[in-house]
Image (spheres, coloured by chain):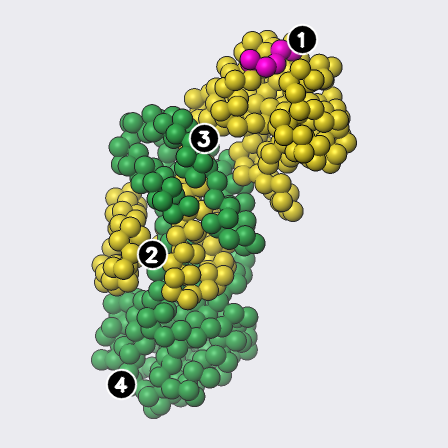
Chain colours: A yellow, B green
Amino acid sequence: MKVVIIGAGNVATVLGRKLLAANHQIIQVFARIPEMANALATELKATACNNWSGIDKKADFYLVAISDNALEEISDHLELNEQLIAHTAGAVSKEVLRGISDNYGVFYPLQSLRKEMKVDPEIPIVVDASNKKSLQLLKEIAGSISSQVDESKDEQRLQLHLAAVFVSNFVNHMYVQSEKYCQSHQLDFKKLLPLIKETAGRVQNYSPASVQTGPAIRFDSITIEKHLQLLNADPSLKRLYELLTKSIQQVG
Amino acid sequence: MKVVIIGAGNVATVLGRKLLAANHQIIQVFARIPEMANALATELKATACNNWSGIDKKADFYLVAISDNALEEISDHLELNEQLIAHTAGAVSKEVLRGISDNYGVFYPLQSLRKEMKVDPEIPIVVDASNKKSLQLLKEIAGSISSQVDESKDEQRLQLHLAAVFVSNFVNHMYVQSEKYCQSHQLDFKKLLPLIKETAGRVQNYSPASVQTGPAIRFDSITIEKHLQLLNADPSLKRLYELLTKSIQQVG
């Protein structure tokens, strides 16, 4: 399939590489910053473009991986001849693409993607479309780069995006808080890396609710009190500890 | 080395297996519940014991992996002839073992250990002791089953334990909340497993602070507002979302 990639950030880069590796032809990369368009275009053996009017209209599929804000305005800039177009955002309706083509949809990677990734992670892809034909096409494209393809409407995709925030952004924030605490107490955060790996690894096979451990779930008030004593010097971290402890005790 | 294991729970079991695999001889397993003592003793090719007076006094090393509460009372039950004894608790002072022997200390695995583990995780071990000779011995024993052995005094070990609560117990709670949300909205939590793996995998190589992503760190109020709308039906989850979002925005 002939593909135009709109965007040159992390998502555009990783999905672009995947599509190229799956033998699609990337004919063009669009980005408003010429250097970014050029860099990704070179990597994907495509031409670069940095103005909307220059977008090649002869592709079969237009993949839009730009910021949510930029997405809201894309229909002001682009009009296609009924070719398939899809965006990659979890929290934006597919309807932002209405008006560009009758064949539009969503191609949402349920994964955290970064250019510098060396190991190829599994990337579940959630698709949605304006009509059956487009949905079928998006499923085929997604299937060419992922073994996990699912369909979700806008609201369900937003719910998935919210669930993802908990297991990714909020989890990483726990790592950040722990790292920060370690730094301020001359502890080596790296010592915790095997535990981080094991905690994430365990829920690959067990329900998280069945493997909750620690002083909170045991209602071990002696240990909790010791921890709170340590946290007296850091009121906001102490409050976070208290709230999460309470949340664990309420939810199980 | 001849070892007596006191306790037959998760930590006793996993460390017992490791010690046996490292060619130590487990001569006895003590647990108050006979069935538990028997089960682990059989696995470790040791004799079982379920009363304190029956503990074999001819071992070189006594490893105590029992609950924090039980630890506080152990010196009422046991007296040794200067052999080495160490407990495995992160949040309990080594001094609870004072009086049992002059040679006592801590052998704290900085890992979440469960009997049903199939894959052998890396287990950093943090040691502490009442004197140099005991410290040296504990380091050697720890070194026989782990490539990461460190020394920490009581307070520093408690701090590590607190830092571990964030990356393990609190992280798992994020998984639990996400799983619960998925269940109540007919979403398949399993779709998030690759993302969970990637999020934990990334901080093996990058500082968590450098890889924080998501609407909170981007101050993306439109997406945050969409998420909060979804959470109107669940006030306590909504409050947790708001607090974590605020915490990310404060800390970075």
Q: Secondary structure at mark 1?
A: loop
Residue lying at 34% horizontally and 40% vertically, measured from the top left: B246
Residue lying at 45% horizontally and 31% vertically, measured from the top left: A161
Amino acid, disc 2 = Gly
Residue A214's mark? 2
Q: Secondary structure at mark 4?
A: loop
Q: Residues within 10 Å of mark 4 (few under 14, many from 20)?
A: some
Along the line of sight, the residue nearer the viewer: A228 or B64: A228
Marks 4,2: beta carbons within 8 A: no
Report which quarter residue B133 is drawn in.
bottom left
First-in-chain label (1 vs 3): 1
Amino acid, disc 4 = Gly
Q: Position of residue A116 (x, y in %)?
A: 62, 44
A6 is higher (above) or lower (below) than B145 = above
Query: Can you see residue A160?
Result: yes
Mark 1, residue position: A81
Residue lying at 71% horizontally and 14% vertically, measured from the top left: A57
B140 is higher (above) or lower (below) than A230 = below
Does the magenta run of residues contain B116?
no
- Whole-angstrom CA distance, mark 4 to mark 1, is 85 Å
Mark 4, residue position: B99
